[in-house]
Amino acid sequence: MEERSFYLGSRPSLLLSLLLFLHHQQAYAQQGILHVSGDGSVQATRDYCMLYNPSWTSLPSTLDNAKSYRMENLTTRQLCSASDVPPRGIKDKAVVVAFGNCSLLEMARIAQNNSARVLLIASKTGLITPTGNKSTFKDVTIPIANVRYRDIMEMQQIVGGNVMATLYAPPVPEFDYSMLVIFLIAVFTVALGGYWSGASEIEDLRSAANCGNRDSRRQEENASLSPLSVVLFVVVCCIMLLLLYFFYKWLVYVIIAVFCIASAVSLFNCLAALIRKVSFGQCRISCCNRIIEVRLIFLAAFCIAMSVVWAVFRNEDRWIWILHDILGIAFCLNFMKILRMTSFKSCVLLLVLFLLYDVFFVFITPLITKNGESIMIEVAAGPSESGEKSDENLVVVPAEPSVLREKLPVVIRVPRLDFSALTLCGMPFSLLGFGDMIVPGLVVAYCRRFDVWTSSSCIYYAACTVAYAVGLGVTFLALALMKMGQPALLYLVPCTLFTSSVVAWSRKEMKKFWNGSNYEIMEPLDNGVNTDSGVTAHEPSVVQYP
């Protein structure tokens, strides 16, 4: 299976230590397609996953260029000697045998000496790329591939007894349209999260203006990250990542539980913000000395139900990814809204530290770990028995696709849309970590709030959002050109920070932009005019905001 993914990083909780990773597995030409069809009245066709060794055999890249052979099911035999060949012979057939006491190449030689065209090894335990000492079997030229035993049984029930088998290996496309879907989701989430943060700032300013107390707004903020908080936050992420590396089997369930709770709350906050805009259906009841809208009670039940459905069916890759992405988007939006950076200085520190965090745990830790794998990738991929990686660049496919390892719910997932052998051997996804949206999204949200403070007509917000889109596009381009995983923050950090700085310098607001909300506190709160922004220091800038 192949998964394309990008580094991530996000919130100060158990989830945050997971949210920075990049895991990209290169697609080797080891997965192929076994196309079967009936040669009689039954015209049913099916495609199945198979693994072969490309250094032994080259297969056609298209079905039209491949030859079909009648399949001979000899799974009750091992074909380790000439006596295992049935009396009717196996000439010009695709022979299916079970694993035996001899090597694959020994079975292939016997099959080839009896004029067989293809050797298929049926496995009940899973698939692995065929290997062996080919130097002593140079005369063996027939294709050898591993297939699932249950697939052999299934195809005979569906297609019939007379099965025609065709082997081919279509190339894996460099670009998949799922990457475009990921791009649109990410840009939409970051843009909407920044806008929501700005809208919340406008409401706070108006409320503060009505109350005549500027400090009350800051006391009501959900969370803020000062430079010291940023440093502590990154340290906590490092500790949590190391704990996950050593205790993954247990902590993964803690992370799943945290995500269930956080996603339900986030979905409720997102939908409640929309529902409150609707003027009708505002029936209220009194409970525990509080007035509660009935519609919000039903909304809470709905959000909890969605979270529970995800928890129950989280490993059902064929459709649960839709609900997973919805919950993930809600989580990112809510996070960007409630966590507010106090200054651009904090933004710079946050992004730079997470970039260093990324680089160290992905590119430096392989030099330290015993198996030569990065800690970040080991945590992202889960236990080594996942079946997606083995020595010598071999591909392994589990015997049963339904038997899946627990994965960390910290990415947006979209199935690959182009047909290839990967879609048969597993459920490959294009992935983007929550942190690749949240961490740069916090900068976008800060830019939007700064626009509110200075009545600058969304110039910072628009510029930073476009910079994020450009940085993410460059990430995808580098991924396609280099054919290897790219840390998204390596491109997103300079794009967002540089663009925001250029806008601030060009508008001669760099000092105010750098200090952020602290700049307002340091200024005398009188009726004097703030020369940088053209608004009075005493009045909240929201008064002039359209």
Image: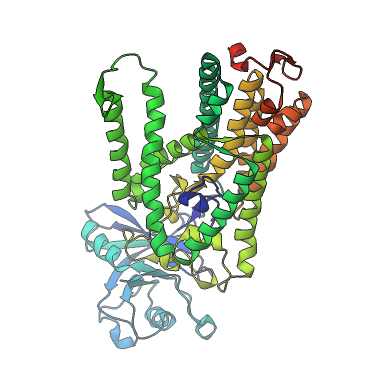
Image quadrant assignment for residue 500: top right
Residue 57 percent location from the top left of the image: 50, 70
Q: Which of 46 and 483 is in front in this view?
A: 483
524 displayed left or right of 386:
right
Residue 159 percent location from the top left of the image: 25, 57
Residue 47 visible in this rendered orientation of the protein = yes
Q: Nearer the viewer, residue 470 or 305?
A: 305
Image quadrant assignment for residue 345: top right
Against 138, is 360 above or below? above
Residue depicted at 62% across the width and 49% down the height? 231
81 displayed left or right of 213:
left
Q: Which of 13 and 461 is in front in this view?
A: 13
Q: Which of 141 and 154 is in front in this view?
A: 154
Against 495, is 398 above or below? below
Residue 38 percent location from the top left of the image: 27, 57
Residue 26 visible in this rendered orientation of the protein = no
Residue depicted at 33% across the width and 42% down the height? 307
Residue depicted at 50% across the width and 83% down the height? 137
The N terminus - image quarter: bottom left
Residue 286 percent location from the top left of the image: 25, 23
